[in-house]
Amino acid sequence: MTLRIASLARSICSLQGRLLAGLAMTWLVIVGIVLMLAWLFGKGLVDEANVSHLRYESQLIADDLARQVERRLGALQRLERGLRTAEEEALAERLAESQVLMEWFEGLMVTDADGRVVADWPVVPGRVGLDTADTEYFRMIRHSPWPYVSRPFTGRASGDSLVLMLVPRFDERGHFAGVVGGMINLADGGLFRRLETLRLGEDGYVSVFSAAGERLFHPRRQASSVALEDDLGDASVRQLALDGWQGETVTHGSDGTQTLMSYRQIWPANWIVKVAIPQAQVRQPLGDFLGRLWWAWLVLAIMMLITMRLLVRRLLSPLHRLERQIAQVGAGERRYLELSTNMHELRQVASSFNRLEHERLAALEHLRDRQAFLDAVLGSTPIGMFVADLNGRLNYLNPALLELLGLDAVHSAREWWERIHPADKQGTEDMWRHTLATGSDFVRQLRFLHPNGVTLWVEVHASQVQGNEQSLGFVGMVKDITERRQQEALQRWEAEHDPLTGLLNRRGFERRLEEALAEYAKTGTPSVLILFDLDHFKPINDEGGHALGDEMLRRVAQVVAWEVRRSDHVARQGGDEFAVLLPSCTIKQAGEIAESLRRAVSEVTVTNEDKTYSITLSMGVTALQEGDESVESVLARADEASYKAKAEGRNTVVLSTFDDDLIDSLW
């Protein structure tokens, strides 16, 4: 099953499959466009034709209903003329003689000029004597002596919906004498019987309503839909029809459906006829026709595809032979193409391919020679070299670099990164990602952990290699700078340290004092400076020599360095002068530290020719203060306190307070 699917996929992706697919898609697009245009233009024509049909149908219905209303009103007028000479007692008899009118009316009645019913037929108990003077139809016909059709009402006896067709009565002198009326049952009276049998498709219908908007007729089979249409139709069009407008329109239902509607007026009864057909029903025949046309075109397209497939396969057979020969060239089974065909285009393709293949083989041979030369150069150079692709993966490390880093010939890029010193790894990776993203040079000094446990300092310099149109990768060089870094570190240490005691010298100490002063100005961090020199040191140099003096200086340096904190800075300023910088320390704490130094150093001794020498300290202590703008002012204040200590008898600690004129002594 899988093989069949794969074969089908290859067939579809072939030139033959694409040609057939393109033909099929072209056919489908053309058919789709034709059908869409036919639908777009056809539905307009269909709508126009159906609107004309609705206009004609609604006019026929309105004319027919108008004639029926006029016949009934005419019959009532003739009856009224026959009743003019009859006495009131004979009116009932005259109505009974008009039995033929019962084909059109449910019942007949006669009223006098005051609206009282004086006769009816058939006789309904309670109707004679009924006062109709307050009814709308009596008031209307009394003030406008013309035939009139009343608004629908519910009959007391039958419970059906009725309307009254009325004509005025006149006496012999032409005065208003009452009305003659005929009742029509809207449901069973026969007036709308023809409309019951009229069919306008599955969902089309005809309805009749009065000028007041009261429904007089609707088809029973469409009762629910008619009610919904009347309730939710286009209110503005409906109101226009109630105001006397007649014509055709398209309304939109609440569910988005569209309906073609035609309104006509029945002037004798002041009624309105509405003929409605859903637009979907109107367009359904067109849709059915286009659907059948679609299937016919689909069958024709399938037959065309089968025919075209045979023709295309025959035409493409030389191309298949060309494909097989190209595959053989790629597999090394033949050197060049040998295609015999009458198709000029394929012969040109074969000739161009053979020319390109010849050039490719020559270029490949040249590339192998250049690659061999490059490998020889990289392999023999004593400098560590590497090659990386555009994604940063290392593709090649030459023997010199493998030996330098202690890596095997079989290595991974991950091993390279894992050997970088943890303190340098994150910065190196960030800079390498920046180089890959921007193409800028990568230059960095970093520490590399050699497998034998030695930490190497190496300098890496990598540059991007540009081809004719795009970047090809990166070439880098790695140098061992371990000895140079060690020499630089030694030089930096010697530049700031005293070679005799190993303490900071004046230059190194002043740099740290400047840093403390800047930190105090920035954050207010307190620091204290202690200056002191050795009392009674000159006899040691004079009697024991400089070697004994140097030994005393070294011992004093060891004791002072032992007594202070690791974060404190101890320096030999020169000769027998020493300084201690106490960061993050108050003047009170510094005084206690100075006192402990004085006691500890007083116990240091050296011996020469059975004579023991000892020393004491004269110490000046000062804290950084507001207004200190340079290290010279701080050193001067501490030096002044140190001289004050010597003046007070030596072996003393003098504190310089915030008031420059006040010096406190500790002993």
Image (cartoon, helix red, strand yellow):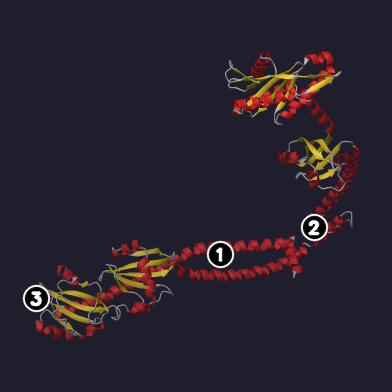
> Gap between marks 3 and 2, in whole Å?
113 Å
Q: Name the residue under label 3.
A: 172
Residue 638 against residue 568 in the figure, above or below = above
* Of residues 620 and 637, the one drawn nearer to the viewer in this rendering: 620
Kindly identify which numbered label has been placed on residue 343. 2
> Gap between marks 1 and 2, in whole Å?
39 Å
List x then y, in percent, for residue 458. 81, 36
Q: What residue type is labelled 2?
A: Met
- Mark 2 element type: loop
Q: Which amino acid does label 3 sit on?
A: Glu
The image quadrant that residue 559 belongs to is top right
Residue 474 against residue 123 in the figure, above or below = above
Q: Name the residue under label 1.
A: 35
Q: Residue furthest left?
A: 173
Image quadrant containing the C terminus: top right
List x then y, in percent, for residue 650. 69, 16
